[in-house]
Image: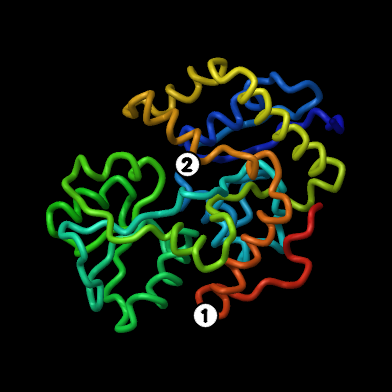
Amino acid sequence: MTTLDQRTLRIAYSPCPNDTFVFDALAHGRIPGAPALDVAFADIDVTNGMAERGELDVLKVSYAVLPYVLDEYALLPCGGALGRGCGPLVLTREAGTDLTGRTVAVPSEKSTAYLLFRLWAADVVPGGVGEIVVMPFHEIMPAVRDGKVDAGLVIHEARFTYRNYGLHKLADMGEHWEETTGLPIPLGAILARRSLGEETLTGLADAIRASVRAAWDDPEASRPYVMEHAQEMDPAVADQHIGLYVNEFTADLGEDGYAAVRGLLTRAAAEGLVPPLGPDALRFP
């Protein structure tokens, strides 16, 4: 692993189990030669805004924000969340609801979940959905249950808990994406400031990979950190969450990972949802 200078990098990622699992060893100084981290916890809609404002050295963001920030930040080839069978869900109170003209709650309009939803809707809701309402993630399922909105777009552990709210899965955005592209689902990315320099960026990627491997080698070592920041989550749900979102693409994007990212952002740009990517935008370092 490339040895980095000992500057402290300011980083923000979510308190979700997959992020704390991935970064546990690195955040706690257990990766030799890695930089010290000054960690802030924030939901992804907050870190997306941080990236757009050029704050912090390293950020976990949605892939949907990449077209707006890649001049200043580089996409790291590891540490993020891609996968199969792990896409966002559209939930409704009644099974089989027609979403034409209906109100849909979403956690952010600059999220991969939202891009996947709009691409799905363009294919299967020809009349178009109605009003989009942005609300905090934890409010979406109660809002659908209580009839405040007609449908909700949910992510992460909601895959395992939506039945507790008496809700129905109308569609799985990941299934639609995989069926139409054959590619994994790009969800969350790790970005680092380009001005850190090539050596630091390469060393940081090596350190993140080492942190992922350390968590896989000894999952119990990360459990206190994971559960400290997921205090209201059942440990079994936390384990499901990690199992779903931490996988081979977390260790390295690889050809399929990069194809998925470029494919999503190219299709979204064609729909006018994001600016187009430049030909070298995803190059690392």
Q: Single out the mark in the foreground, 2 or 1.
A: 1
Residue ranking furthest to the bottom: 127
Position of 97 with respect to 39 (left or right) is: left
User: What is the quadrant of residue 27 in the picture?
Assistant: top right
Residue position for label 2: 42
User: What is the quadrant of residue 100 in the picture?
Assistant: bottom left
Question: Residue 72 at what x, y percent from top left?
Answer: 71, 59
Location of residue 65 with respect to 266 vertically, above or below: above
Question: Residue 284 at what x, y percent from top left?
Answer: 79, 54
The amino acid marked with disc number 1 is Gly
Find the distance from the CA under tag 2 to the CA under tag 1: 28 Å
**Observer-nearest residue: 6 or 190?**
190
- For disc 1, the neighbor class at 10 Å (few under 14, some 14 to 19, many from 20) is few
Location of residue 108 with respect to 34 vertically, above or below: below
Which numbered tag is attached to residue 88? none
The amino acid marked with disc number 2 is Ala
- For disc 2, the neighbor class at 10 Å (few under 14, some 14 to 19, many from 20) is some
- Which residue does the image show at 41% across and 30% down from the upper left? 238
Residue position for label 1: 272
**Observer-nearest residue: 74 or 270?**
270
Question: Residue 44 at what x, y percent from top left?
Answer: 48, 49
Question: Residue 209 at what x, y percent from top left?
Answer: 71, 34
Q: Secondary structure at mark 2?
A: loop
- Which residue does the image show at 63% across and 21% down from the upper left? 28
- Which residue does the image show at 30% across and 45% down from the upper left? 138
Location of residue 135 with respect to 159 vertically, above or below: below
